[in-house]
Image (cartoon, helix red, strand yellow):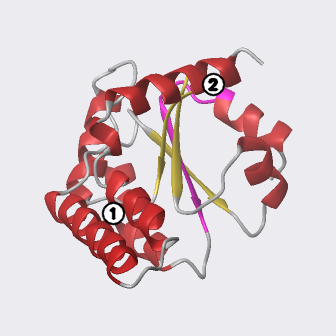
Amino acid sequence: MDIQQFETEIKSHGNPVVVDFWATWCGPCKMISPILHKLAKEYQGRVDFLEVDADQSPDLLRSLGIMAIPTLIVYRDGKQVLRQTGARSEAGYREMFAQLAAGEAAPAPAAMSTFDRAFRLLAGGFVAWLGFQYNLWPLIPLGAVVMFLGVYDRCPIWRALTGWWKNARATK
């Protein structure tokens, strides 16, 4: 599918459209596929679901700035309202579909689980500690980045910067 076909397809839907960018070799894609199909069936007529095989549409992924899969992009009235990269829980996807079906303008991204948050903080702390302990200085900033990935969704500076970046890209 090329970008023009994709835009035509997205604009042809009267309902919000959840687009799943996936690949056959992607483990997380295989994990979330049954969940998304189940929700698409439950919310049929209120939320539309579209799948795009990343291997069949590399130019489309490049033009949309998709760097990792699985990526879900939600469109309402032909405009992107949400982008999520990586697998989420069924509860997170269910909440997103419910918000879309209820007509909420832009559904909130699914929250990071407590396990994911704790794992990232502990793993990052361990990597930074290794850097200090063994004078492996490149590990210290790497550990800091991994720790930041455990809290970035709660950081007001990060929210402000990403909001600014999204607005700058939207006005291009």
Residues marked 2 and 1 touching at CB (< 8 Å): no
Q: Name the amino acid, label 1.
A: Ile
Residue 153 colored in magenta in the image: no
Closest to the observer, 93 or 172: 172
Indicate the secondary structure of the residue bearing disc 2. Answer: loop
Q: Which mark is residue 20?
A: none
Q: Earlier in the sequence, mark 2 or mark 1?
A: 1
Q: Position of residue 68 (x, y in %)?
A: 60, 61
**In the image: residue 133, left or right of residue 37:** left
Q: Residues within 10 Å of mark 2 (few under 14, many from 20)?
A: some
**Residue appearing at x 29%, y 73% in the figure:** 123
**In the image: residue 45, left or right of residue 59:** left
**Residue appearing at x 26%, y 60% in the figure:** 89
Closest to the observer, 152 or 80: 152
76 versus 124 height, above or below: above
On the image, numbered disc 1 is attached to which residue?
Answer: 35
On the image, numbered disc 2 is attached to which residue?
Answer: 78
**Residue appearing at x 23%, y 58% in the figure:** 117
Does residue 109 appear in this view?
yes
Q: Which residues are magenta?
A: 11-22
Does residue 77 appear in this view?
no
Residue 17 colored in magenta in the image: yes
Q: CA distance from mark 2 to mark 1?
A: 24 Å
24 versus 38 height, above or below: below
Q: Position of residue 151 (x, y in %)?
A: 28, 47
Q: Name the amino acid, label 2.
A: Gly
Quarter of the rendering occupied by the C terminus: top right
Q: Quadrant of residue 169?
A: top right
Q: How many marks?
A: 2
62 versus 160 height, above or below: below
